Amino acid sequence: MFTGFAARGGLTDHHDDGFGIGFFEDKACRLFMDNQAAASSPVADLIKRYPIKSCNVVSHIRKATQGDPLRLENSHPFTRELWGRHWLFAHNGDLLNFHPVSGGHYQPVGNTDSERAFCALLEELKQISPREPCSTRVVFEALCAMSERTSEFGVFNFLLSNGQALFAHCSTRLYFLERKWPFSKARLVDAELSIDFAQTNDPEDHLCVVATQPLTLDENWQPLQPGQLLWIEGGRIMQKAQLRVSDEVRKKNEILLTLPA
């Protein structure tokens, strides 16, 4: 899967301003990033040979709208610690005039709107519970409110994970796919390669994949609607919320949906 995804970073698509991938192993995540295009990056070549086995993976290819595209610190996904766990965040979009007031716990390292949004999300979660972890349901409900407010500043497609759950918010364009036994074969969209998922998964495995555009052919990718937020855990969709989208934002998003991803 990563082979096809990486091809979109400068070969089959124009997202060539860096990339990153993080995959969780219990509380911690292994994070690989590069400010080079994924299609030509030596780091991407290393990852293609790396035996990734994880319950939660977040990957991103970047097309810079804000922040210097040559700086490594502006590559996604971003990571921070909250409640004794690593959190990963990747954003696809553009938040205009978004300058949230910092609570002092989380500061951006780079100069992107994406990292500012991530720090703001974590600040709010930490205010809800400064020391002890919130339940996943409380986190989900808080993200609903935060996502509605942040989306007023522009396009806010994002993935957020703490290794236990994955949250996906659609502002303009996201697709999701569930895989379970009996697994089938599928062809990658961006590479001449087919994958037999029965050979890479066990019968009890259940997977959910979220992407800006479908990564494979021959599978039933479903579009998310603007304003929808998913809570995914154990490879299953636990809850789907439809958030409020203002008429102004909806009109802007309708225009953006006619443009290439």
Image (cartoon, helix red, strand yellow):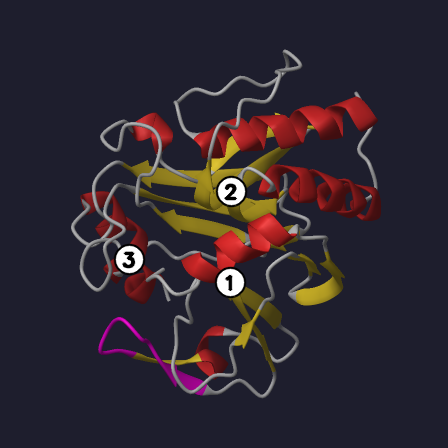
Residue 154: numbered disc: 2
Q: Nearer the viewer, residue 220 or 163?
A: 220
- Residue type for callout 1: Leu
Q: Which of the 4 image quadrants contains residue 100?
A: top right
Residue 69 in percent (x, y) is at 26, 33
User: Is 235 rendered above or below residue 155?
Assistant: below
Distance from disc 3 to disc 1, alpha carbons, whole Å, reads: 18 Å
The residue under the point 39% across, 70% down is 215
Q: Secondary structure at mark 2?
A: strand
**Mark number displayed over residue 80:** none
SS class, disc 3: helix
CB atoms of marks 3 and 1 within 8 Å: no
Residue 219 visible in the displayed image: yes
Percent position of residue 258, x then y: 39, 65
Q: Nearer the viewer, mark 3 or mark 2?
A: 2
The stretch of residues the image draws in magenta is 185-193
Q: Residue at x 23, y 47 (%)?
A: 16
What's the residue type where badge 2 is placed? Gly
What residue did someone put label 1 on?
174
Q: Is residue 187 magenta?
A: yes
Would residue 129 be seen by someone viewing this image from the given angle? Answer: no
Sequence order check: which comes first, mark 1 or mark 2?
A: 2
Gap in angstroms between the C-alphas marked 1 and 2? 16 Å
Residue behind mark 3: 6
Is 57 within the magenta?
no
Looking at the image, residue 48 lies above or below residue 179: above
Mark 2 Cα shell of 10 Å, populated few (<14), some (14-19), many (≥20)? some
